[in-house]
Amino acid sequence: MSISQSYTKITEQITINISKKLEKPDYNMIKKRYSVLLLLAFIIAFSAFKPSKDSLEEVFTKINQDVLLRGRAYETLEAATSTIGHRLTGSENGKKAEEFAYKLFKEYGLDVKYMPFEVETWARDTVSLSIVPRNSDNFRDIPVVALAHSPVSSHLKAPIVDCGDGLDTDFEKVKDAVKGNVALFNINIQLPENKGKKNLHRSEKTALAIKYGAAGVIIANSVEGGVLLTGTASVTGSLIPIPAVCVSVESGKAIRRWITEENLLAIIDMQNFSRPIRARNVIATIPGSSKKHKKEKIVIGGHLDSWDLATGAMDNGIGSFTVMDVARVFKSLNLRPKRTIEFVMFMGEEQGLLGSKAMVKKYKEEGKLDQVALMMNLDMVNNAAGFSSMGRNELKAFLDDMGQRIKKIDTTYANLNRGGAGLHSDHQPFMLQGVPVCSPSGSFPIKAYNCYHANCDRFDLIDKKQINNNVRFTAMMLYALADAGELPVKRLNDQETKEFLIKQNLKQELIIGKDWRWEE
């Protein structure tokens, strides 16, 4: 009903009421009725002028325009990599990174807090690897990088045993030879007989080596050009009992050639640092606008920490600084979806998902984990072109539908959504508690992919347009999820979570990683 129609109807009603009382008019009564009807007219008029909530497409358009005109992910990541450098958890640089994120959230006008937690920090000192034939002094020094969480001090001299790709079947073939010796294996699947098999994380392969009695580990990288890879060799984030190192793909091939010629000994010397420290997740919050959904929250996060060989621009500056710019967009546009959103910068991911594990543990102890309706994780997300529903098909249908609406705003959005679940990032602790998880997905230039965990992971790998695509499309999907009347997925109970993980073929990895909590 229009305002003029409302006024006409009210006027007619007033006339009727007055006419009914013409014979014996009661002017006080007429005055009261007129006042009530006039007040009603003002209420209707005010309601007509009250702005309605923007449609989803209107919100998407605003997000798109804001990022294209005012996006800051590229600039803030450049500032962090140039003024801080690496962001190793437990280091002075790690502390500076936490403070950088806190101040940036504050600058954007968000409510922000630290969530401290204690970790056993690890940092490298010195390491060397020499190869020498048995009963010879013909030493060959091999370029090498120590893997976390190798022992604080280690001196090992032992024969090298080729353990193929480091899968359980590979270790089983050499189980009688590997005990007490140094296991050499590939970081990726390389052998024809293992083609099509699921690869394991370097920490899981190291855990298998320890299980089979190896005294040390040499992992051969798969990237050509002498690239050395770092990362953790521990499934728990605690120190492992044997030294673990990485060599280049070229060195790995050379060692294997030498093994066929003569028995080789590996001499590994290393010194590292390890001590308990306090690290901090950084959490910014936008409260939900709906009373019905006020106890529900969506956690969107990315790990702020990085390894110390470079500045961690791709891993995971591109993910964490995307999350911070998504927060800026929501605050800049005053977007208040139904559900509360927590924007989280996790620390300690590289050393064993320490920050996300601490957050889940804290929320569980405080009875707040049930409030987390969904977790969206951004780890090495570049040029977002779709989303992974992490094994929840009902969520994938929602992502497909919302993706079609995003394509109306920008036809370059590919809407390539996938469903399989994986491990080894900050979504894992949430998923293991039955919380639905998802993640944007995209593509990497080969140059950037080859710098994973290496000394070339620097800001010159970052493309401004591609990181802005992360921000635009992630912000749109986040708003759609946070403002949905009902989310298409619910938290799984303990039995449902167990069945889900088995169906996703994750049980064996979780057993190796000591994260399988169900008795068989």
Image: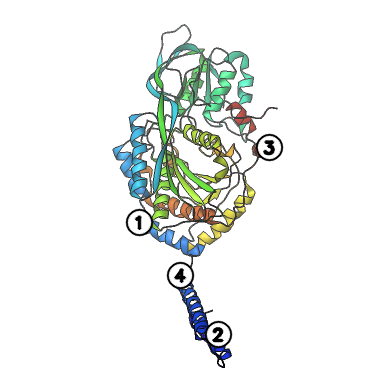
Is 136 located above or below residue 121 in the figure? above
Q: Position of residue 425 (x, y in %)?
A: 51, 37
Q: Position of residue 88 (x, y in %)?
A: 39, 31
Mark found first going from the N terminus, 4 or 3 = 4
For the residues labelled 1 and 3, the Cα–Cα distance comes to: 46 Å
For the residues labelled 2 and 3, the Cα–Cα distance comes to: 64 Å
For the residues labelled 1 and 2, the Cα–Cα distance comes to: 54 Å
- Which residue type carries mark 2? Gln
Disc number for residue 50: 4
Residue assigned mark 3: 495
Nearer to me, 268 or 65: 65
Q: Residue at x 55, y 12 (%)?
A: 180
Q: Please name which of the two marks, 4 or 1, marks the residue nearer to the observer.
A: 4
Pick out the residue farthest to the top.
Answer: 135
Is 277 located above or below residue 302 in the figure? above
Mark found first going from the N terminus, 1 or 3 = 1
Residue assigned mark 1: 70
- Which residue type carries mark 1? Arg
The secondary structure type at the circle numbered 1 is helix
Disc number for residue 491: none
- Which residue type carries mark 3? Gln
Mark found first going from the N terminus, 1 or 2 = 2
Residue assigned mark 2: 13
